[in-house]
Amino acid sequence: MNRKLKQQLKLMNHTLNTIAKNQALIYLKLEELDKQVKELSTDQKESQIGSSNDCT
């Protein structure tokens, strides 16, 4: 394999590895945000239930 092609393949491999790592980090962050949204939604529902019980 000539030198230029080998260098291009190394760069492509590095770029693809970086993309894969970034994708994994984005997925983890999305999971974390989804969990937070669900917790906030649950807290809000519980708060609404508590305030409706106070009215009775």
Image (cartoon, rainbow, N blue to C red):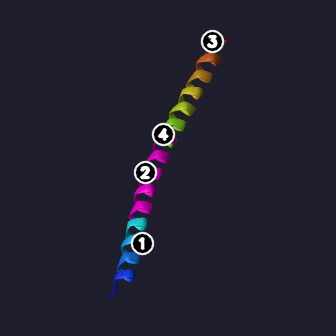
- Between marks 4 and 2, how big is the CA–CA gap? 15 Å
Marks 4 and 1, how far apart in space? 35 Å
How many numbered discs, if any?
4
Looking at marks 2 and 1 on the same chain, the residue that comes earlier in the sequence is marked by: 1
Query: What residue sits 63% from the left and 17% below the top?
Result: 51
How crowded is the residue under tag 3: few (<14 C-alpha within 10 Å), some, or many (20+)?
Answer: few
Q: Earlier in the sequence, mark 3 or mark 1?
A: 1
Task: Name the kind of residue labelled 4 in the image.
Answer: Lys
Q: Is residue 27 left or right of residue 47?
A: left
Q: Please, what secondary structure does the residue beneath circle 1 have?
A: helix
Determine which of the numbered discs, if any, sits on residue 47 in the image. Answer: none
Label located before the other in sequence (4 or 2): 2
Location of the C terminus by quadrant is top right
Q: Which span is picked out in magenta?
A: 17-33
Quarter of the image for residue 40 reads top right
Pointer 2 residue: 25
- Look at discs 4 and 1 and give the one toward the viewer: 1
Residue matched to label 1: 12
- Mark 2 element type: helix
- Say which of marks 4 and 2 sits in front: 2
Q: Secondary structure at mark 3?
A: helix
Question: How many C-alpha atoms fall within 10 Å of the one at disc 2: few (<14), some, or many (≥20)?
Answer: few
**Which mark lies nearer to you, 3 or 1?**
1
Q: Position of residue 3 (x, y in %)?
A: 34, 82
| Amino acid residing under circle 2 | Leu
**Mark seen at residue 35:** 4
Residue 24 falls left or right of residue 46 = left
Lower position in the chain sequence, tag 3 or tag 2: 2
Look at the image and tell me in which quarter the N terminus lies.
bottom left
Residue 31 counted in the magenta span: yes
At 47% from the left and 51% from the top, the residue drawn is: 26
Q: Earlier in the sequence, mark 4 or mark 1?
A: 1
